[in-house]
Image (cartoon, rainbow, N blue to C red):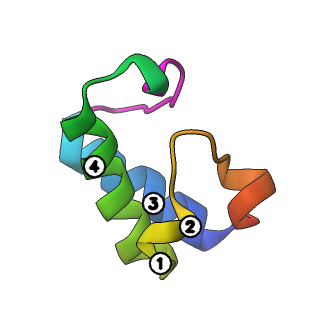
């Protein structure tokens, strides 16, 4: 796992008050949760909003591993 990925996970943990974060079921989550995850990802990974969608994956689409 790269440093950017670790930083992104830590950002999710802080945003949602979690000690661990999994994106399982994100498609069923309310839009405001998706928007918060999108905003953290854009900030940490320096990607454009257009690159983030409900059908994207962090590894395949953003190259995070």
Asked if 55 appears above or below 37 in the picture, the reply is above
Calculate the distance from the C-alpha at mark 1 to the C-alpha at mark 2: 6 Å
Viewer-proximal residue among 11 and 54: 54
Which SS class for mark 1? loop
Viewer-proximal residue among 43 and 49: 49
Are the two marked residues, 4 and 2, in contact with CB atoms closer than 8 angstroms?
A: no
Left or right of 57? Residue 37 is left
In which image quadrant can residue 38 be found? bottom left
Magenta part of the chain: 18-26
Calculate the distance from the C-alpha at mark 2 to the C-alpha at mark 3: 16 Å
Are the two marked residues, 1 and 2, in contact with CB atoms closer than 8 angstroms?
A: yes
Which SS class for mark 4? helix
Identified at 44% across, 33% down, the residue is: 21
Calculate the distance from the C-alpha at mark 4 to the C-alpha at mark 2: 13 Å
Residue ID for mark 2: 51
The tag on residue 31 is: none
Res 9 visible: yes
Percent from the top left, x then y, of residue 54? 52, 40
Q: Which circle's residue, 2 or 3, is located before the other in the chain?
A: 3
Q: Which circle's residue, 4 or 3, is located before the other in the chain?
A: 3
Residue ID for mark 4: 35
Are the two marked residues, 2 and 3, in contact with CB atoms closer than 8 angstroms?
A: no
Viewer-proximal residue among 47 and 54: 54
Residue ID for mark 1: 48
Label 2 crowd (10 A; few <14 / some 14-19 / many >=20): few
Label 1 crowd (10 A; few <14 / some 14-19 / many >=20): few
Is 44 magenta? The answer is no
Residue ID for mark 3: 8
Identified at 27% across, 49% down, the residue is: 35
Asked if 16 appears above or below 61 in the picture, the reply is above
């Amino acid at each position: 796992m790269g440093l950017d990925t670790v930083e992104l996970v830590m950002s999710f943990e802080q945003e949602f008050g979690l000690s661990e974060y999994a994106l399982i079921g994100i498609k069923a989550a309310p839009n405001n949760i998706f928007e918060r995850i999108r905003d953290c990802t854009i900030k940490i990974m320096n990607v454009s909003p257009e690159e983030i969608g409900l059908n994207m994956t962090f590894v395949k689409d953003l190259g995070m591993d």
